[in-house]
Image (cartoon, rainbow, N blue to C red):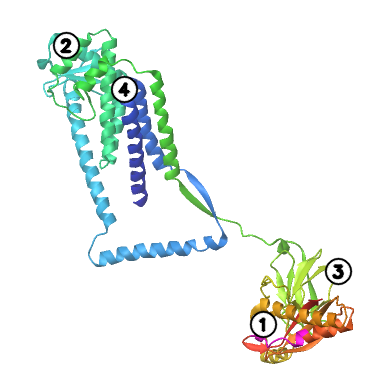
Amino acid sequence: MENWFNFLFHASVGFSLFFTVYWLLLRQSTHFTANRIYLMISVLLALMVAAFPFHYTVTLTPSASSQLPNLSGILSHQIISGSKNTSENGGVSWSTVLLYTYLTGAALFTLRLLIQTWKPLRVNYSSEPKIQGGYYIHENDNYALPFSFFNHILINPKYLKQEEIGEILSHEQVHIRERHWVDLLIIELLTVIFWFNPFIWLFELAIKQNHEYLADQGVISRGHSPVRYQALLVNQLMGMQVIGITNNLNFALGPTRLNMMKRQKTSKKRLFHMAWGIPVVAFMLVAFAEPQYEKAAPATNTVQSEATKTIHGNVLNEKGEPLTGATILIRHTTKGTVADRSGKFSLEIPENGCELVISFVGYRTVIKKITPNEDNIKLKMKEDVVGISTKLSPAKKEMPAPPPPPASSKQADNKDKKVFVIVEDMPQYPGGQPALARYIDDQKKEIIQEARTEGKTLKGKAYVNFVVQPDGSVGQVKITKASGSKYLDEKAIEIVKGMDRWSPGKQRGKAVPVNFAVPIEF
């Protein structure tokens, strides 16, 4: 039922768009045959696009597609539950009301069409026709006005003068010869299906009106007097339309039809206006296109698709102690593992070798190439030291590396006794890095001034390593790279030892010692 309503809606939109093009650009044209073709093709195109929509493919990733059945089930459950609740409460759903309303209207218009068709059929079978020019002429007293019904012409001779018969027969013969009844049969059947759509009735009116233009043109082209023919039409003006499926002499009779006989022939350039139907078709194809979903093939890891082998290894620090929780990754992939309590690991790698990336908090990252025959690898990592900038401009803040995986309580106690390099909350000097840089700069100026007084010249650069203790004090101060002058090295150590108390670094909320290095240049 839902598909049928979608079809009715899509076709109705197509009717409205095609008829708008006709009304704005073509209805005043004298190219009646071209207009007839446009009207019928546009109706059929609207039906075809609605009935056979364009389909395009949408590829779903495995994660998205796996949710579709569940979603469909939920929707189905809601629809079933809604219908059950409606039936239990004794009510009727809106879709049911809409369906019965549509079927009632379709039934009434079907009955109307059958009744209107039965009357002329009964006249045809009950009267003896006269054959003239290959057409069947039925004289009858049931209808006041002449009209054509398929290839039969029904005439009431009592209301017609003898001299008018030639024009009348020529008019109806055009309808029969050009098979206008085919157009009428199609459009009348569509009025039954789309009885609710006003544009289908406008199409019917336009098609019948265009038939009369064609018939008028055919009569005048046969040499009949236009003035006398127009007088005949005016005389029939008060007649009534008989049925929808017939061509009636006085249909759409008015100033517009009479003026069409005298209108100058429209330029052939106006025929290009029909090309506006192409954007209408394109719009319908895009607007009513229906997606077809298909599952994408699961992405395979290039490493997994290759032949693999398993290697083993051990991650240690410079003292030979295991680095529990060190991360080992195959370079340029997301495949890897973590070292256990003993620093050991096992990893499946490509059979032809690869590069491993080993990282651990506070240690320099190691990149090691593994050859195909290599196994039982020992990886030693060096501690990294955080260098402090002594420039007066604020240094760029670097984000610390993430902490290692949580360890057992025993491991945590052991680690707290060690000196950290990177922790979750790094130590902070009072006033931040600018204050520290100003302090070192002021101390250097005093030392330089004192040296000049004593006649000494200071020049060199010393690297000082120190530890910010859990209480914020500075300890374990030592020279890691000498300046070449014992005096300068001693002064550099004095500067570092004279620092104010820091805000201590913290790991998992607990204050821990953190190692730093600072360059002091004179």
Q: Which is more N-terminal, label 2 or label 4?
A: 2
Residue at 43% in and 35% down: 279
Query: Within the image, what quadrant is residue 288 found in?
Result: top left
Identify residue for label 4: 179
Q: Which residues are magenta?
A: 495-507
CB contact under 8 Å: marks 4 and 1? no
Q: Which is more N-terminal, label 4 or label 3?
A: 4
Give the mark toward the camera: 4 or 1: 1
Identify residue for label 3: 373
Q: Secondary structure at mark 1?
A: loop
CB contact under 8 Å: marks 1 and 3? no
Q: Which is more N-terminal, label 2 or label 3?
A: 2
Residue 276 screen position, x and y as percent:
41, 31
Q: What label sits on residue 164 in the rendered view?
A: 2
Give the mark toward the camera: 1 or 3: 1
Q: Secondary structure at mark 2?
A: helix
Query: Within the image, what quadrant is residue 387 found in?
Result: bottom right
Between the C-alphas of marks 3 and 4, the distance is 88 Å
Label 2: how many Cα within 10 Å (few below 14, some 14–19, many 20+): few
What amino acid is at disc 1?
A: Tyr
Q: What label sits on residue 429 in the rendered view?
A: 1
Which is nearer the eye, 136 or 420?
Answer: 420
Give the mark toward the camera: 3 or 2: 3
